[in-house]
Image: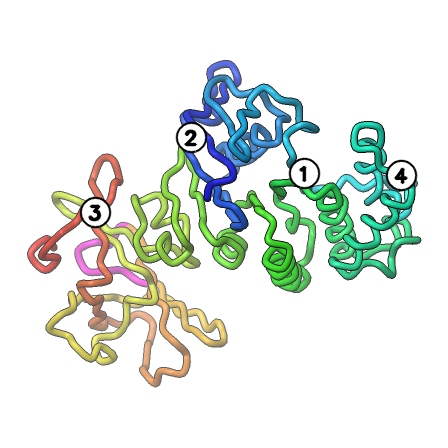
């Protein structure tokens, strides 16, 4: 069942098309991630769902009701900002209670109800022991949970999160991802998460919306987006390192670095494309070796291979090797548009 429906949504800033005709359905209880580079329109899209930006065209419905012209407080949504935006002069309890007090007259919350809601939400996020502290006395992860608790205490239909993990260090960020996903599953709330970080998107999203230049490029599960990219942009934006793209006479073809391995490791070489590969540099990254080199006939740009370190194969620099990619792992793209092309016989297409 779709909770949020977006139809033909557009937002123009003078001549800039920040969001340019977005159609999207967000399911009840799902964790949807909007992923894209800076300036692609993802935050503008979220702000229009929240009611903080007025669309130039299109419609937004939440729970079957048209909310396009409604103010933020009447949409049943809450938002967690990148900066957390906690009030420094208030303790944690009062920060979380603030939106309830703002709604006191409309919802008729008394002090007892407010205290119960704050304590229940704080307990769910495991910050109930911090209610008397000020934001300056909290770690980055604790501040993030306070910001989420403040957004959750009103029991919104949709929780919007605008890059809320970007201020955390790498280790804390990984822990925060796990906590955020567990919390979303346990509360069964519908969450929309904006990020430019593909690792966050792949780790958190039930589905991922990939955006570029104000348009949706592809919507799907993390595995669908990674394994079957709709176009060249999606193929190269996801993956670390990204997909190798090589131009041929009539089209482009690509393959993931982890699928590009020495021929000696291929158990079915007759179903693989063999490339002559000149190794220029090898990086040892613990579990993997990242190999930089040139495919014969395509010497204008580097091609990367990702070889597991526990595989006993010698890879010397300034040396030619035979590397192979299975035909099933090759993706083909239109030379001009970058759109994905289906090739029934990849061997003949190369």
Q: Nearer the viewer, residue 196 or 9?
A: 9
In screen coordinates, is 253 left or right of 11?
Answer: left
Q: Earlier in the sequence, mark 3 or mark 4?
A: 4
- For marks 2 and 1, the one nearer the N-term is 2
- Is 318 within the magenta? no
Tell me the SS state at disc 1. strand
In three-dimensional space, the C-alpha distance between marks 3 and 2, rounded to whole angstroms, equals 28 Å
Mark 1 → mark 3, Cα distance in angstroms = 44 Å
Q: Secondary structure at mark 4?
A: loop
* Residues rendered magenta in the picture: 293-300
Q: Earlier in the sequence, mark 4 or mark 2?
A: 2
Which residue lies under the disc numbered 2?
A: 22
Q: Which mark is residue 78?
A: 1
User: CA gap, disc 1 to disc 4?
Assistant: 21 Å
Of badges 4 and 2, the one in the foreground is 4
Q: Position of residue 98 (x, y in %)?
A: 84, 38
Distance in Å between CA atoms under marks 2 and 1? 21 Å
Q: Nearer the viewer, mark 2 or mark 1?
A: 1
Q: Which callout, 1 or 4, points to the residue nearer the camera? A: 4
Residue designated by label 4: 110
Residue 220 relative to residue 62: left or right: left
* Main secondary-structure element of the magenta-colored stretch: strand
Q: In percent of the image, x 34 and y 55: which residue is there? A: 243
Crowd around label 1: few <14 · some 14–19 · many ≥20 (10 Å)? many
Residue 252 shows which numbered tag? 3
């Amino acid at each position: 069942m779709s909770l949020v429906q977006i139809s033909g949504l557009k937002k123009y800033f003078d001549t800039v098309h920040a969001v340019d005709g977005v159609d999207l359905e967000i399911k009840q209880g799902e964790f949807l991630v909007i992923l894209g580079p800076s300036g692609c329109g993802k935050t503008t899209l979220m702000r229009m769902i929240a009611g903080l930006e007025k669309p130039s065209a299109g419609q937004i419905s939440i729970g079957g009701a048209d909310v396009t012209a409604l103010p933020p407080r009447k949409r049943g949504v809450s938002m967690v900002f990148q900066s957390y935006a906690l009030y420094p002069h208030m303790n944690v309890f009062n920060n979380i209670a603030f939106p309830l007090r703002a709604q006191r007259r409309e919802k008729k919350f008394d002090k007892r109800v407010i205290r119960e809601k704050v304590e229940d939400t704080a307990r769910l996020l495991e910050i109930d022991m911090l209610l008397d502290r000020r934001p300056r006395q909290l770690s980055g992860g604790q501040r993030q949970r306070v910001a989420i608790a403040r957004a959750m205490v009103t029991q919104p239909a949709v929780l919007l999160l605008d890059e809320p993990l970007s201020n955390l260090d790498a280790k804390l960020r990984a822990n925060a991802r796990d906590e955020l996903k567990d919390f979303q599953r346990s509360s069964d709330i519908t969450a929309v998460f904006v990020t430019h970080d593909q690792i966050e998107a792949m780790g958190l999203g039930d589905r991922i919306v990939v955006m570029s230049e104000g348009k949706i490029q592809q919507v799907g599960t993390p595995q669908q987006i990674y394994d079957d990219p709709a176009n060249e942009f999606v193929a190269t934006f996801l993956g670390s390192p990204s997909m190798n793209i090589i131009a041929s006479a009539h089209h482009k073809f690509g393959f993931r670095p982890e699928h590009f391995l020495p021929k000696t490791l291929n158990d079915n070489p007759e179903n693989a494309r063999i490339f002559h590969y000149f190794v220029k540099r090898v990086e040892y990254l613990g579990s993997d070796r990242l190999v930089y080199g040139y495919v014969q006939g395509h010497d204008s740009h580097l091609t990367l291979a990702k070889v597991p370190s526990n595989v006993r194969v010698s890879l010397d620099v300034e040396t030619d090797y035979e590397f192979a990619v299975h035909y099933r792992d090759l993706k083909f793209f239109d030379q001009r548009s970058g759109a994905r092309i289906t090739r029934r016989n990849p061997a003949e297409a190369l």
